[in-house]
Image (cartoon, rainbow, N blue to C red):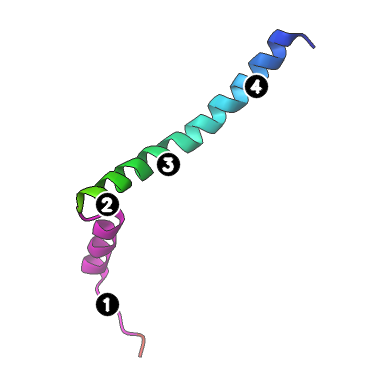
Amino acid sequence: MSIFSIINSTLNIYIKELWFTLPITIYAAVEIRRLIAGEELFIVKLWKKIKDVYGEKDES
């Protein structure tokens, strides 16, 4: 196995991992920026929207 094929396979694995972790990292950075700025977090907005649409269902 040549050094080039080792580098190529390593880069392929890294790029596949990057496509998975990059969106999560960007989302986390945006949420941290909102937290520092004192804005409402996206996940909280989403949760409020879901509660508005489906309402508070009582199981009793």
What's the CA distance linking mark 3 and mark 4? Answer: 22 Å
Q: Residues within 10 Å of mark 1 (few under 14, many from 20)?
A: few
What's the CA distance linking mark 1 and mark 4? Answer: 50 Å
Nearer-N-terminus badge (3/4): 4
What's under tag 1, amino acid-wise? Glu
Which image quadrant for residue 14?
Answer: top right
- Residue named by callout 3: 24
- Residue at 26% in and 54% down: 41
- Residue at 67% in and 19% down: 9
What's under tag 4, amino acid-wise? Thr
Task: State which region is magenta.
Answer: 39-58
Please, which residue is most extreme toward the front here?
36
Q: Residues within 10 Å of mark 2 (few under 14, many from 20)?
A: few
* Mark linked to residue 44: none
Closer mark to the observer between disc 3 and disc 1: 3
Dividing the image into 4 quarters, which one contains the N terminus? top right
Nearer-N-terminus badge (2/3): 3
Q: Is residue 10 above or below residue 36?
A: above
- Residue named by callout 1: 56
Query: Which structural element holds mark 1?
Result: loop
- Residue named by callout 4: 10
Nearer-N-terminus badge (4/2): 4
